[in-house]
Image: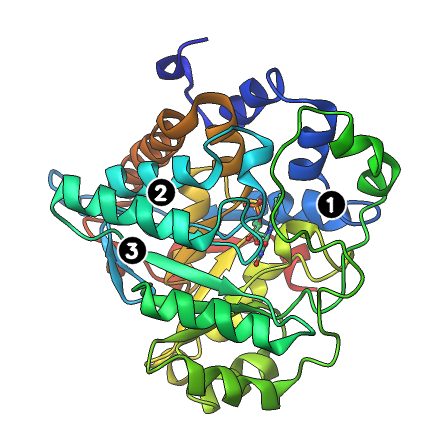
Amino acid sequence: PPVETMLGIEELQEAAKTCMTPGAIDYYAAGALDSYSVVNNRESFRKCRLVPRVLRDVSAVRPQTKIFGVDSALPIYVSPSSNALLGHPDGELNITRGASATGIVQGISAVASYSLADILNEKDQMDEASGRKMGMVYQVYFQRDRSKTEAQVRQAVEGGVNALVLTVDSNVGDNRQSTEKLKGSRFSAEPGPRMGPITETPTFHDPSLNWDDIVWLQSLAQGLPIYLKGVCHIDDVRRARDMGLAGCILSNHGGRQLDQRVTRILMRIEKLTDPQLLKDFEVYIDGGIRRGSDVLKAVALGARGVGLGRPFLFAQAAYGDKGVIRAVRILENEIVSAMRLLGLTSIDQVDPTMIECLQEMWK
Ligand code: FNR
């Protein structure tokens, strides 16, 4: 069906599945073990309800904000996700084009299927054509071979990315049963997608990664802001702040790493609405965000913005860069409409009194 007929993110994802191989669908959709966390990422948003304010003039609404220190058209960004090429031959380049066209920030995975050089080159072309610089952040994995990590970080910094995102919830590989079953047949039997330096090799991730390594990354970052992705515990958030990092992304990696990991993730943000903690420290959230109202719920609870992973992977798989643009437009419509109905004219007007979470969320 034509891309304009797509009216919601879920619909776009379902359309993508009709043109993907079972192995590729599984790689994008899978969760760890029982997929408890995948399901609960959605459920936790459903268990929160919004409380509108009335009789406010909402004729002019501004959904713009700053994400990772960069101007963004909306409080959303593309969460770094691997192997976009599994869905479409242009892979991550589709996302670069779509993010540039819509003014949102693109996160580049350390295991993207296109090389960082290719993606930076596409960004330069888009920047030149549009006359403005798109936002781009680079996600880092600590590899056992630190010289490789160092080379990647240097390339990203010199290439002009706006920030580094260090993913800290994947220092050991994942445990996705459905993916395990398909291994072997999964990629080889399908028309050969170009894989990134795939994380599933046993020697890729460094399980010894610890807080001392952050100092080393800071020395390489040349002053670029660093964000930790995959944080859940309030004490880890505080420690990140105390080390001078720019912020944290509360995430359970889309339910792909530790299953049963906290999925009442909104509650974690609620704790973070401690104004002292959020002063000069940015908190983001990702996982299960599929509607504009989900975005506003997260922001109401203290998040600066939210990341989406699967929606953009599937959108580009179905329609290339047009799918990415469509996904952003769908979310933009929903965000603006929800803002109006909530009585908000700018993102910073939403606050924790405008959200109620069902009691079971707080147990
Ligand atoms: C991911 N994610 C991820 N995160 C990361 O830091 N580095 C990576 O390489 C990847 N790769 C990856 C691949 C695929 C197929 C998925 C679905 C996810 C996690 C991603 O950034 C984000 O945290 C979740 O996808 C958010 O959940 P939703 O939006 O997919 O529900």
Pointers 1 and 2 in contact (C-beta within 8 Å): no
Does the image show residue 296?
A: no
Q: In which quarter of the image is residue 298?
A: bottom left
Going 77% across and 45% down the picture, which residue do you hit?
35
Q: How far apart are marks 1 and 3 (CA)?
A: 29 Å
Q: Is ligand 1 less than 8 Å from the beta carbon at label 2?
A: no
| x then y, percent, for residue 178 | 83, 38
Label 3 sits on residue: 135
Q: How far apart are marks 1 and 2 (CA)?
A: 26 Å
Residue 85 placement, left or right of 138: right
Pointers 1 and 3 in contact (C-beta within 8 Å): no
Q: How crowded is mark 2: few (under 14 residues within 10 Å), some or many (20 or more)?
A: many
Quadrant showing the C terminus: bottom right
Residue 11 placement, left or right of 169: left
Specify the amino acid type for callout 2: Thr
Going 56% across and 71% down the picture, which residue do you hit?
149
Q: How far apart are marks 2 and 3 (CA)?
A: 10 Å
Does the image show residue 44?
A: yes
Label 1 sits on residue: 31
Label 2 sits on residue: 96
Vertical position of residue 158 compared to residue 113: above or below:
below
The numbered mark, 2 or 3, whose residue comes first in the sequence reads: 2
